[in-house]
Amino acid sequence: MDFGLSAEQRERRARTRTAAPEISGAFTAESGNAVRKKLAGLHLLGAAVPEEYGGAGLGALDTALLYEAASDGGADTGLLFAAAAHLFACVRPVLEFAPPRIRKALLPALCSGELLAGNAMTEPDAGSDVSRLATTATRVDGGYLLDGVKSFVSNGPVADLYVTYAATDPHGGYFGATAFAVDRDSPGLTAGPPMAKSALTACQAGEVRFTRCFVPDDRVLGSPGQGQLVFQTSMRWERSCLFAIYLGQQERLIRRCVRHVRERRQFGKRLADLQPVADRLADMRLRLESGRLLLYRACAGIDGGEDPALWAALAKLAVSEAAVATALDAGRIFGGRAVQTEHGIEEHLRDAVPATTFSGTSDIQRRLIAQEMGL
Amino acid sequence: MTDLDRVTLLDGLLRYVREELATGVPDGRLTADSPLLELGVLDSVRTARLLAHIRTAYGVRVPPAHMTGEHFRTLETITELVLLLRSQTASL
């Protein structure tokens, strides 16, 4: 068991932290390409993809360290989330489940940012439950016709490719859904405008609608009926690596809080000398480090070829709940400044809150943990 | 693990599904050739539990390529799959 980083990992972390403040802006018509280039330049779009496909060839742990360093160094949380949704929920399924020819055709462009991908899973009546999909895929000559609406697609308005899930066999139980990689310009696919939202605002999200949208057989991910398997595999990556963004965010918040309590004086003392304030910071550190150990453990599980389901659920639950609690604690420490937009504390809180919902809610993680315990 | 014959394995799996998975299907209707997917026995939660059971009880991890509806259609097909995967592991 080795808790230290290698020289190479330390060097990559330092380089990424230094460049991180450049990761800002939005996917607009004017700046979208520049943003994609910046994300690709730090390898955030193709970190966990082998070099032969244009990726950085990193494993799960090194990918998590990369996202953590970018977040810690000051990259925009919403843009990091957009990159992570692309990489973990879309690029990884293409890498692991697409036929070789499609992998060769898509992966280099997905790693370079020429193509950006969106995960089209959530439906109005199916959030966490992939077995209740209303979107259907009907078998036709040479492929499938997709029909249905995906209601909350991160990167939806700007993506070039969607990884989506549809019911292929109503009596198929666990094997009733199939995963597809669908081009944005497919006839019958309509991507809606960005929805107004209060968190992770740089990541645009919207609806994607399929109306008799033809998808050829070679765009099936895995084999027909393996939709749940593809989704679960992508969620294990997401629950481990994506949440490294929130390790970096907590690190930034704690650093700011430490500086603040050492400088600000009340009742003739530094805030840091007031025991309740020091206790609060100790708890923030405890939550961060506990979540970090679990997240690295989940990543080590993926890299070691173990089934990481338990560790991924534990890590996701711990890190997301810690992110919310720590952003709230930072709010208490900063007092009135916490709600002033210019200080940025309220933005961190807004960005932290959905972490307990996406990639499976905290309740779902507890259920997965219980399941792994044989309950 | 030593030789595991087909009948013992099938009995073990049948007992596990009947006693542990709370399928809602009466025991009499749940047999070796019952269509598990059509009956709704293998939804995502119960499939995950069954896979965990196969892993812990028989030392078999089902690789992605074998995670298909064909292999999980009935307890008989699951039995065949476990035997196949065990023979592959044993020959390594």
Image (cartoon, coloured by chain):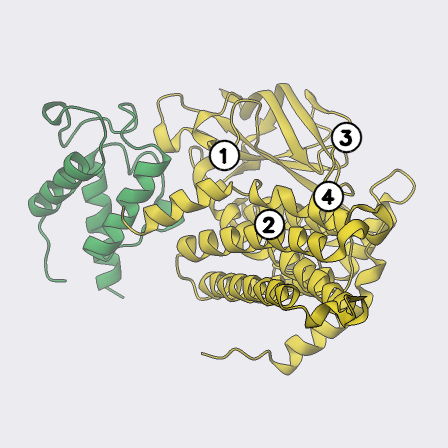
Residue A88 shows which numbered tag?
2
Q: Quadrant of the C terminus of chain B?
A: bottom left
C-alpha span from label 4 to label 1:
20 Å
Residue A200 shows which numbered tag?
4
- The residue to which callout 3 is attached is A194
Q: Are marks 1 and 3 in contact (CB under 8 Å)?
A: no
Foreground: disc 4 or disc 1: 4
Position of residue A167 measured from the top left corner of the image (x, y, whole percent) = 47, 25
Q: Secondary structure at mark 3?
A: loop
Whether residue A123 can be seen here: yes
C-alpha span from label 1 to label 3:
22 Å
The chain displayed yellow equals: A
The residue type indicated by label 4 comes to Leu
The chain displayed green equals: B
Foreground: disc 3 or disc 4: 4
Foreground: disc 2 or disc 3: 3
